Amino acid sequence: MRFLVKNEIGQGLLEVVIAIAVMIIIATALVGVVAKSIDNSTFSRNKAKASSLAQKSMEEARDLRDQNQAEFFTEYYASNTCTATITSGMFTIVRDCSYDGDETVALEIIASWTDNKGEHETKINTQLTNWR
């Protein structure tokens, strides 16, 4: 039979418990970092999609201007034909056109969405002019 010596190499129960506790703390921190990274990635993807939809709506307004330029630069046409609200999935795009006179139409597009962090929006503003 062999007797245990105090300096004998080996792992005691206390060392194993401490090692497991340290690994759990590190794993918990990593899960938090990954979760935050996923949230940031989702927000960035949604913001890029909202910006893309707003840009698309702006291009549609430019197409309206180019198709019927004579009528586009009247107060009635600009405010009633160009103004629109569009829903695309989780996004709502509001395009507001207002006649500023001197053959200029002010265009504001707001793309908004709601997620688990609240309501968000991105805005685009421009002036459409009679360039012909």
Image: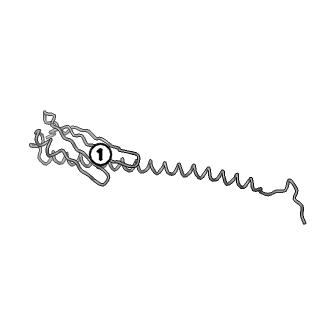
Rendered-image quadrant of the N terminus: bottom right
Q: Between residues 115 and 44, which one lies in front from this camera angle?
A: 115
Q: Position of residue 57 (x, y in %)?
A: 24, 48
Residue that appears at 67% across and 54% down: 20
Relative placement, left or right, of 21 versus 2 is left
Q: Position of residue 11 (x, y in %)?
A: 77, 57
Q: Residue furthest bottom?
A: 1
Q: Position of residue 92 (x, y in %)?
A: 28, 49
Q: Between residues 82 and 70, which one lies in front from this camera angle?
A: 82
Relative placement, left or right, of 7 versus 70 is right
Residue that appears at 24% across and 50% down: 86
Relative placement, left or right, of 82 versus 29 is left
- Label 1 amino acid? Ala
Rendered-image quadrant of the C terminus: top left
> Label 1, on which residue?
111
| For residue 35, above or below residue 108 | below
Residue that appears at 26% across and 47% down: 93
Secondary-structure class at tag 1: strand
Q: Position of residue 18 (x, y in %)?
A: 70, 51
> How many numbered marks does the figure carry?
1
Q: Residues within 10 Å of mark 1 (few under 14, many from 20)?
A: many
Kindly indicate the quadrant of the structure image that contains residue 126.
Answer: top left
Q: Between residues 12 and 91, which one lies in front from this camera angle?
A: 12
Q: How is the image coloured?
A: one colour
